[in-house]
Amino acid sequence: ARVRALRVDRPGACRARNQGLAVARAPLVVFLDDDVLPRPGCFAALEAAHADRRVHAAGGRIVLRFEGVPPSWLTTPFVSYLAGYDLGDWPRDVTGDGDALVPRSALMSVRRDVLDRLGGFCELFGPRAGRPMVGDEPELCRRIVAAGGRLLYVPDAVVDHLVPATRLTEAYLAQRFFYQGVTEAFTDIRFAGVRAAWTRVGRGLRHRAAGVSWDGVANAEGNAMLERCRRRQSLGYAAGCVVGLLRYRALRRLAA
């Protein structure tokens, strides 16, 4: 197989993907993160999923592999914030299941003709310049669904995602939750407008600011950290609304 490496002069995961897309020639494009290891059969499983032309994007299982022993406070709610993605052992259509369950770009396949029509990834989203921005997959998947495409979870496509010890700290997770809030605000502004985003600040975030407990007294340390991180996420959403006002035209451009 031929391998071509491209130099990306400006940082940004979405910018790098779009540059790769510009030179891709195959009808199916697979995106991987640089810290994952594909298991045998991964790409064949994704290719098989696209035998149904209605499937425009598919994503596989992302298994977390930790550097050392994971801390005792690491409970289920933190897994997705570390890029874990596992919806079980059976294929699943996730077209109408919301942003939280769409395929992840750490292992995601998309039909190239679909990406060409949609203009690729929106470069206002996704990691760049050391900031753990997210939201790139939900933003793209919303446009895919609006264009009539289906999204599929493919359990037989598996990668191992390497998680360094530096990401298993409250400081990292607080930052990760904060930028989750920022990108949620960007997404709401892009697809629903500023008023809808500020309405969410005034109403829905009061519940989140109070914190969310998942594991009861069995893991008090994990619950307390989750509560603090959720508050950071709320602050991030409010900050995203402010920044979103400054980038309103760019965010609304090409929204579904």
Image: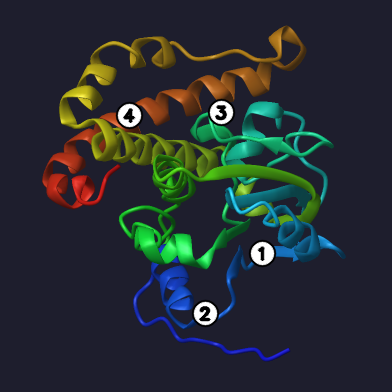
Residue 104's spot in the image, x, y percent? 59, 49
Q: Is residue 66 above or below residue 99?
A: below
Q: Which residue is mark 2?
A: 24
Describe the element under mark 1 as helix, strand or loop.
loop
Identify the residue at image location x=40%, y=16%: 209
Describe the element under mark 4 as helix, strand or loop.
helix
Sequence-first tag of 3 and 2 = 2
Classify mark 3: residues with Cα within 10 Å, few (<14), some (14-19) or many (20+).
few
Q: CA–CA distance between discs 2 and 1?
A: 22 Å
Q: Which residue is mark 4?
A: 235
Disc 1 residue type?
A: Asp
- Residue 110 visible in the snapshot: yes
Sequence-first tag of 1 and 4 = 1
Sequence-first tag of 4 and 2 = 2
Side (left or right) of 163 relative to 140: right
Side (left or right) of 248 relative to 203: left
> Which quarter of the figure is the N terminus placed in?
bottom right
For the residues labelled 3 and 2, say whether their Cβ atoms are less than 8 Å apart: no
Q: Is residue 143 above or below residue 215?
A: below
Numbered circle sitting on residue 97: 3
Sequence-first tag of 2 and 1 = 2
Identify the residue at image location x=47%, y=74%: 21
